[in-house]
Amino acid sequence: MFNRLLYPVTITDIIDIILVAGLFYGLFILIKGTRAIQGLKVLGVLIIGSFIAQFFQLYTINWILKGLWMILPLAFLILFQPEFRRVISEIDKNYLWGILLTQEKRLISEIIKAAIFLSKAKTGALIVLQQNISLKHYVDAGIRLDAETSSELLNTIFFPGTPLHDGAVIIQGDKIAACCCVLPLSQNPDIEISLGTRHRAAIGLSEETDSLVIVVSEETGAISLALNGKIVHGLDEEGLTEMLTLYRSKEAAAASGETQ
């Protein structure tokens, strides 16, 4: 290439120089605009420039363009780092959201199966699903399990013959954090007199936290759900599924947002 500089300047050399100057001027102008559009334009300029350089055998510009093609991937990573980060973040968010939804569906399914089984067997149960407010104090006072949530394990815990059936089970995330947990009894004077200790404990915890508390009555087998200091009685499988899905999906959405 440098030997050519000693030769007389030809029309081809003039075109070569003009194109090189135009290329750099064009790149300079493009840098001032929107970066995403710039990227496409720069890529287009390089492709067209390479084609012209090859076609007319413009050695100088061809040599420069080859160098630009070599550093182009790194330059794009540096110049468009925020865009790449945003795309990766969006992919991670969608991936995480998919995982959370899958975990929630499995968790709700296991809890529903246990509640229906315990209801049919008229076995008393108290199942707490922690939301945003920590229940560490109650977990620490109970018996630690840190076990995968399953209907079989919940049924076993609340079976009357086991030493773990008294008190509440607390679920954190998708794991049973502890059992035999003692919950605060509601002191609300407006609560129905007929409600027993489990129901009062469920309401009491829901008054102090945003937890969802499922109660299965050992007298009638009826399923209830306490939240925000209120209790909904007589839930069937469909009703319990609908309520848990509604309130747990809100929690999953909040968790996804926090990880961004």
Image (spheres, rainbow, N blue to C red):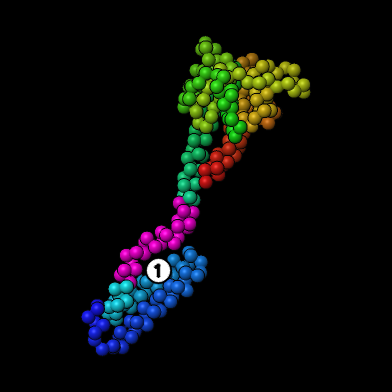
Tell me residue 215's x, y (percent).
Answer: 62, 22
Residue drawn at the location 40% of the way across and 79% of the way down: 22
- For this view, does 238 lie left or right of residue 80? right
Tell me residue 120's x, y (percent).
Answer: 57, 19
152 is higher (above) or lower (below) than 16 = above
Snapshot quadrant of residue 167: top right
Of the residues shown, which amino acid type is indicated by label 1? Answer: Leu
Q: Main secondary structure of the magenta part?
A: helix
Task: Return the residue at label 1.
Answer: 43
Q: Is residue 82 magenta?
A: yes
Name the quadrant of the N terminus: bottom left
Q: Is residue 90 visible?
A: yes
Residue drawn at the location 46% of the way across and 45% of the way down: 95
Residue drawn at the location 70% of the way across and 22% of the way down: 186
244 is higher (above) or lower (below) than 26 = above
Tell me residue 231's x, y (percent).
Answer: 68, 27
Snapshot quadrant of residue 44: bottom left
Q: For the residue carrying disc 1, how many other residues have a C-alpha within 10 Å: few (<14), some (14-19), or many (20+)?
A: few
The magenta-colored residue range is 65-88
- For this view, does 216 lie left or right of residue 156? right
